[in-house]
Image (cartoon, helix red, strand yellow):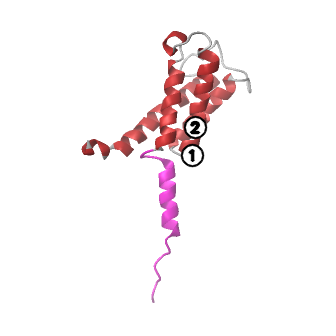
Amino acid sequence: MDQLDKHTPHVLGLFRIVVALLFVCHGISTLFGVLAAPHGGGAPAFGQWPGWWAALIQLVGGILVLAGFGTRTAAMVCSGSMAFAYFTEHQPHELLPIQNGGEPAVMFCWAFLLIMCLGPGSFALSSAVERLRGQAAVPAPAVRG
């Protein structure tokens, strides 16, 4: 297991990137009508509750998680929006996700919850920013001359 454990940050980073990219695609599809047909017969009107706001969370939250910037907070919002979507849009129709078409909402909810708890893993923009801040905080050596 030790051989696999050393790859955990990289696998987590790739998992974060793939999940967020798929989430962003949902937002783009809903807001702009590209990549796939929008669900529900057309793009929601600007500001329409809850469709437009859900798509905005998918787009903006997905981009933040994808980049690894503000990852835990963005993942929490994304997870919560998918829980809300499941319980308001899917679960009232049937009990189980397989019956009500809510599998994507459930999977995204739990995937973002995992990312929120475990952090961004490798390849995160926040890690690069922290490294730069750390280098800036180190005083430059004195020049003698």
47 versus 65 height, above or below: above
Residue 81 location (% of width, % of height): 61, 29
Asked if labels 2 and 1 touch by Cβ distance under 8 angstroms, the answer is: no
State which region is magenta: 121-145
Residue 4 location (% of width, % of height): 28, 41
Q: Mark 2 is on which residue type?
A: Met
Q: Which mark is residue 96?
A: none
Residue 44 visible somewhere in the drawing: yes
Going 52% across and 13% down the picture, which residue do you hit? 96
List the single residue furthest toward the bottom: 145
Q: CA distance from mark 1 to mark 2?
A: 10 Å
Residue 68 location (% of width, % of height): 51, 44
Q: Secondary structure at mark 2?
A: helix
Does 122 lie within the magenta span?
Answer: yes
82 versus 93 height, above or below: below
Q: How many marks?
A: 2
Dot 2 crowding, Cα within 10 Å, few <14, some 14–19, many 20+: some
Q: Secondary structure at mark 1?
A: loop
Q: Picture quarter containing residue 39?
A: top right
List the residue tagged with mark 1: 70
Which of marks 2 and 1 precedes in the sequence?
1
Residue 137 location (% of width, % of height): 52, 68
Q: Quadrant of the N terminus?
A: top left
94 versus 2 height, above or below: above
Going 50% across and 49% down the picture, which residue do you hit? 125
Q: Which mark is residue 76?
A: 2
Q: Quadrant of the C terminus?
A: bottom left
